[in-house]
Image (spheres, rainbow, N blue to C red):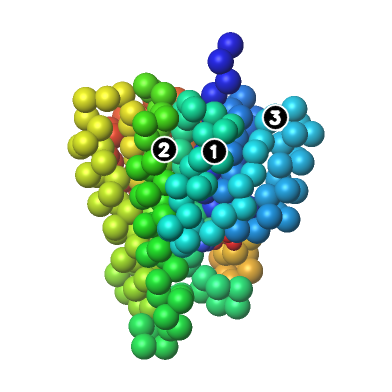
């Protein structure tokens, strides 16, 4: 039987990491992308010990001029991609989240990072799309923003852009069987949420709820149509 391949960005932590492990457990050969090599190596080892196949490509998606080079490396692994999960995002740095930090307070790099990641993911999608199998799926990870919140400008602008990308790409792909979805999760009990919002466990969703939705979208077990932004709450 032909192997199935999945490319996952943001695979070193949280939702991306669990998505990678879930896809590997379902028989996908997974290709993991994130900056932190040491973390990717640990996840690779875990997947391999469980009998899976995993390639890692430590890469900074904001370095958009190097995306072609990344895609060449992916091509050496496979020419047939079944899943592209664009999960990387930048909603915090190592010391605090963007929440409650006005635009004027933010360092320039903190403002540009979320936007540049989306640029990187759009270019990655563009360069991978011709390698995608007929029934492939593209998942783009957005986010939920409360109307009362302030301080999320870079992330909000990036994620609404990613949602628009999802809708427009689905239109371009309407005559193909490649489906594209965005997921807009509410709070998820990831390690970053545990670090910054330790008291929010009751409010937050388990990561498995998000990975289950991802699998259902990939396996065509939902009512959602290509281009939809799927909101998911606890
Ligand atoms: N957690 C939540 O409650 C929640 C809610 C709604 C939406 N989301 C979205 O879900 C996604 C995952 O969030 P999370 O909380 O699970 O993860 P996270 O702990 O914030 O990790 C983000 C992931 O993106 C990667 N990443 C960040 N900057 C990158 C860059 N420049 N190049 C390549 N990879 C980069 C990180 O890896 P490296 O640092 O190793 O590069 C990491 O794997 C994000 O897009 C986030 O906006 C999360």
Q: Are marks 1 and 2 in contact (CB under 8 Å)?
A: yes
Residue 128: mark = 2
The reply to whether the residue tagged 2 has its Cβ within 8 angstroms of ligand 1 is: no
First of labels 1, 2 by sequence position: 1
Above or below, comparing residue 90 to residue 141 in the picture:
below
* Nearer mark to the viewer, of 2 and 3: 2
Q: Are marks 3 and 1 in contact (CB under 8 Å)?
A: no
Residue 199 in view (yes/no): no
Q: Quadrant of residue 117?
A: bottom left
Residue at 33% x, 28% y: name it: 178
Above or below, comparing residue 41 to residue 203 in the picture:
above
Disc 1 crowd rating (10 Å Cα; few below 14, some 14-19, many 20+) is many
The reply to whether the residue tagged 3 has its Cβ within 8 angstroms of ligand 1 is: no
Residue 182, position in %: x, y? 35, 45
Distance of label 3 from label 1 (alpha carbons)? 17 Å
Kind of element beneath mark 2: helix
Residue 48 in view (yes/no): yes
Q: Quadrant of residue 189?
A: bottom right
Distance of label 2 from label 3 (alpha carbons)? 23 Å
Is 28 left, or right, of 163 in this rendering? right
First of labels 2, 3 by sequence position: 3
Residue 74: mark = 1
Is 19 left, or right, of 105 in this rendering? right
Q: Residue furthest right?
A: 49
Depth check, front residue: 110 or 192: 110
Residue 6, position in %: x, y? 53, 34
Residue 33, position in %: x, y? 57, 48
Residue 52: mark = 3
Give the quarter of the figure containing the N terminus.
Answer: top right
């Amino acid at each position: 039987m032909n192997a199935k391949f999945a490319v996952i960005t943001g695979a070193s932590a949280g939702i991306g990491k669990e998505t990678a492990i879930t896809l590997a457990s379902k028989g996908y050969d997974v290709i993991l992308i994130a900056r932190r090599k040491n973390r990717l190596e640990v996840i690779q080892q875990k997947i391999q010990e469980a009998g899976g196949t995993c390639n890692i490509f430590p890469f900074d998606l904001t370095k958009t001029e190097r995306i072609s080079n990344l895609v060449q490396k992916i091509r050496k692994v496979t020419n047939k991609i079944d899943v592209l999960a664009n999960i990387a995002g930048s909603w915090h740095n190592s010391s605090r989240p963007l929440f409650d930090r006005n635009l004027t307070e933010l360092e320039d790099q903190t403002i540009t990072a979320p936007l540049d990641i989306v640029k990187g993911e759009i270019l990655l999608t563009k360069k991978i799309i011709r390698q995608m199998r007929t029934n492939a799926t593209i998942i783009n990870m957005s986010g939920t923003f409360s109307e009362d919140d302030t301080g999320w400008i870079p992330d909000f602008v990036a994620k609404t852009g990613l949602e628009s990308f999802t809708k427009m790409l689905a239109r371009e792909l309407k005559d193909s069987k490649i489906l594209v979805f965005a997921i807009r999760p509410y709070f998820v009990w990831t390690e970053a949420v545990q670090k910054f919002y330790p008291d929010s466990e009751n409010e937050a969703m388990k990561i498995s709820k998000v990975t289950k939705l991802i699998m259902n979208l990939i396996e065509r077990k939902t009512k959602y149509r290509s281009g939809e932004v799927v909101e998911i709450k606890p």
